[in-house]
């Protein structure tokens, strides 16, 4: 039988050698693949490290770009910082001590492998900074890190010995919406926030950060009692942040269980920078008016009568003795400049009289009560009636009316010749008289102020805009006269109605506010209503009260000498028997070193035995809170406004 030898031929020596070559080739291929995987895993790891270094360097640089771009005196305000590297493209071999280069070095990258440039908004494909924030030079920064990574296996199969890994990060200033409780903007003052005596700051609810102090001073905060234990989203505490110090939380600061004391926090900047300043009222009837009114008229709480002011232009207002309805300055109380009123004239008989809306007369015939009558309707200027003055029979009931040709006269009672109590109709008060005797809003000895119940512009509150350096001066002995108390719930008592503290769509009145306040009361415009409180105006976007005091950004406050350790001129809010000011207080101008030199400063001073409250948001260059009975500040924590922040863009 013949044997089959084919299987033996299959395993000839030549074929075994071929198989070995194939095995070697496969092994080489697998080794190359594994080598490539190893090399490029390393490349990927270096890419991540380079990106982390670029991000850190970019964000650190952006913090200085923010300071330099938003603070015109940054070199003075931050003497420990160097801003000279900002502006021209460079690599870190040229400027190793610049902030982005130092942060890149901390992450292992230095020299020519790190480049810094300052692109435009269009280069980055982002929207520019709105013009409302002013012109900011070099608001963007881009850092590129190059990492040459050596290859160990790839070069077996190719000529590539290194792979240049590049990572870039772009940062810059962008507009974001942020909650704005209490912000103190001065960049260098020590202290810029001061709470002394029994004064206090109290915050309820709101965002995680309740207070921001921008000063770089290690003594930026000198705080007695600051209570944040019921602040924050959960009502269990909120953060107190300061750019400078002290580094340790002051003993009187209570941040609750959920809050932190944060020294070294990046400055916040002006959160209201994008809010346009109000235009000066113009045209016929744009000037504000002052007139004396009897007790109970439009909420007048003084049995001796009040001065009722209407909203409007007060840039050319008058002081001293003025006529009924004239443009009297907002100088209340005893002392030079306070408004008093000349007696209204007799009605001109026959067709010779010419009257305008708001003019007043005090007829001498058929007016046994000696009442004053106001022109409440004027169809056309003039007095066409031929009726003699002696024939007119004037109504003797307050509120009674009498037609008189084109005019309707209304009995407005027996107004006082002067008063230390003022009531303000809703609307914008544009204050622009430059001299201190008549400028700003001044409450002198015995002065009292309240909101009126008149309709005004329908905003349910007032906004005082200070177009010059003269702003607020409330003497510590104002607010202590005996007039009817203010009822925050809007009650009517004894015929006097109090405008409600709460806005129609606003937050409930804080429980800390007592049922009555005997002293001064001013209420900002309600958001989401009409007039200056309407959308895109000056009410709070959340329906609460908006801007109560608004200082021109180009004129520092100038209300007299501050107390509590501040030098120079400041806005002073005091009160002998307590007060309520509800709405935003915005007093900001530049970054000068002292009050009155490019700086707006606010002093809140509660009087002995009174309850003093500010309810709303405060943005000011410096804040001093003093007083022997305490000042409670209840911030509006839900309102958000546009702010510039340095952020990572790409």
Image (tube, rainbow, N blue to C red):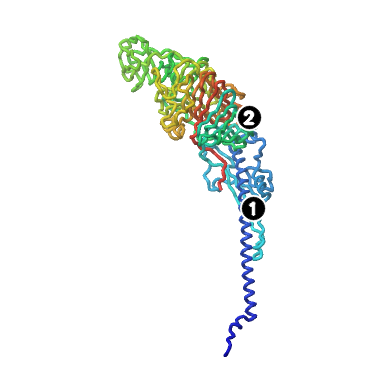
Find the residue positioned furthest to the bottom.
Answer: 1
Considering depth in this image, is 501 or 143 the residue closer to the camera? 501
Q: Callout 2: 10 Å neighbours few (<14), some, many (20+)?
A: many
Q: Where 44 sits versus 301, above or below? A: below
Identify the secondary structure beneath mark 2: loop
Instruction: Please tell me the numbered disc located at residue 190.
Output: 2
**Whether label 1 touches label 2, CB < 8 Å:** no
Q: Callout 1: 10 Å neighbours few (<14), some, many (20+)?
A: many
Instruction: Please tell me the numbered disc located at residue 97.
Output: none
Q: CA distance from mark 1 to mark 2?
A: 43 Å
Between disc 1 and disc 2, whose residue precedes? 1
Residue 156 position within the rendered picture, expressed as x and y whole percent measured from the top left: 66, 65
Identify the secondary structure beneath mark 1: strand
Considering depth in this image, is 629 or 383 the residue closer to the camera? 629
* Residue 596 shows up from this direction: no
Considering depth in this image, is 126 or 583 the residue closer to the camera? 583
What residue did someone put label 1 on? 146
Tell whether 130 sits left or right of 99: left
Residue 611 position within the rendered picture, expressed as x and y whole percent measured from the top left: 51, 22
């Amino acid at each position: 039988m013949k044997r089959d030898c084919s299987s033996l031929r299959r395993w000839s020596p030549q074929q075994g050698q071929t198989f070995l070559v194939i095995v070697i080739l496969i092994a080489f291929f697998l080794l190359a693949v594994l080598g490539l995987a190893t090399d490029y895993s390393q490349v990927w790891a270096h890419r991540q490290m380079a990106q982390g270094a670029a991000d850190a360097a970019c964000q650190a640089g952006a913090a200085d770009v923010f300071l330099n771009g938003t603070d015109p005196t940054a070199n003075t305000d931050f003497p420990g910082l160097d801003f000279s590297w900002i502006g021209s493209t460079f690599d870190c071999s040229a400027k190793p001590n610049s902030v982005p280069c130092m942060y890149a070095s901390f992450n292992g990258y230095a020299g020519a492998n790190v480049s810094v440039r300052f692109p435009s908004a269009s280069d980055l494909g982002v929207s520019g900074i709105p013009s409302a924030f002013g012109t900011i030079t070099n608001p963007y920064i881009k850092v590129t890190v190059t990492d040459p990574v050596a290859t160990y296996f790839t070069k077996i199969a190719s000529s590539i010995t290194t792979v240049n890994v590049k990572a870039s990060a772009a940062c810059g200033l962008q507009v974001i919406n942020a909650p704005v409780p209490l912000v103190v903007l001065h960049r260098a003052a020590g202290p810029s926030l001061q709470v002394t005596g029994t004064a206090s700051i109290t915050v309820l609810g709101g965002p995680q950060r309740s207070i921001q102090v921008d000063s770089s001073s290690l003594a930026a905060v000198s705080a007695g009692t600051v209570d944040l234990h019921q602040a924050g989203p959960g009502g269990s505490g909120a953060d107190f942040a300061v750019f400078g110090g002290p580094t340790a939380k002051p003993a009187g600061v209570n941040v609750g269980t959920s809050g932190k004391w944060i020294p070294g926090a990046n400055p916040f900047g002006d959160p209201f920078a994008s809010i346009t300043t109000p235009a000066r009222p113009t045209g016929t009837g744009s000037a504000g008016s002052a007139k004396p009114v009897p007790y109970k008229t439009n909420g007048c709480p003084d049995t001796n009568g009040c001065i009722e002011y209407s909203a409007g232009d007060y840039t050319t207002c008058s002081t001293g003795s003025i006529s009924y309805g004239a443009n009297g300055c907002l100088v209340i109380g005893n002392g030079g400049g306070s408004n008093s009123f000349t007696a209204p004239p007799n009605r001109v008989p026959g067709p010779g009289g010419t009257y305008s809306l708001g003019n007043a007369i005090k007829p001498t015939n058929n007016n046994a009560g000696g009442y004053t009558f106001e022109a409440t309707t004027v169809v056309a200027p003039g007095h066409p009636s031929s009726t003699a003055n002696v024939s007119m029979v004037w109504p003797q009931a307050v509120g009674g009316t009498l037609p008189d040709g084109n005019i309707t006269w209304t009995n407005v009672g027996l107004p006082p010749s002067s008063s230390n109590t003022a009531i303000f109709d809703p609307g914008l008060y544009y204050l622009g008289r430059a001299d201190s005797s008549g400028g700003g809003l001044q409450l002198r000895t015995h002065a009292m102020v309240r909101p009126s119940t008149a309709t005004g512009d329908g905003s349910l509150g007032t906004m005082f805009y200070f177009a010059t350096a003269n702003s607020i001066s409330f003497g510590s002995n104002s607010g202590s006269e005996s007039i009817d108390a203010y009822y925050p719930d809007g009650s009517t008592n004894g015929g006097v109605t109090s405008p409600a503290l709460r806005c129609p769509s606003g937050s409930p009145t804080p429980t800390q506010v007592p049922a009555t306040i005997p002293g001064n009361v001013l209420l900002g415009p309600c958001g989401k209503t009409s007039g200056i409180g309407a959308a895109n105006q000056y009410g709070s976007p959340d329906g609460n009260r908006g801007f109560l005091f608004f200082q021109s950004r180009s004129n520092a406050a100038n209300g007299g000498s501050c107390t509590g350790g501040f030098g120079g001129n400041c806005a002073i809010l005091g009160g002998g028997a307590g007060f309520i000011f509800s709405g935003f207080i915005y007093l900001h101008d530049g970054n000068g070193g002292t009050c009155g030199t490019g700086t707006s400063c606010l002093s809140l001073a509660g009087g002995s035995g009174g309850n003093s409250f500010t309810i709303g948001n405060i943005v000011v260059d410096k804040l001093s809170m003093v007083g022997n009975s305490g000042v409670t500040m209840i911030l509006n924590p839900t309102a958000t406004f546009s702010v510039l922040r340095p952020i990572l863009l790409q």
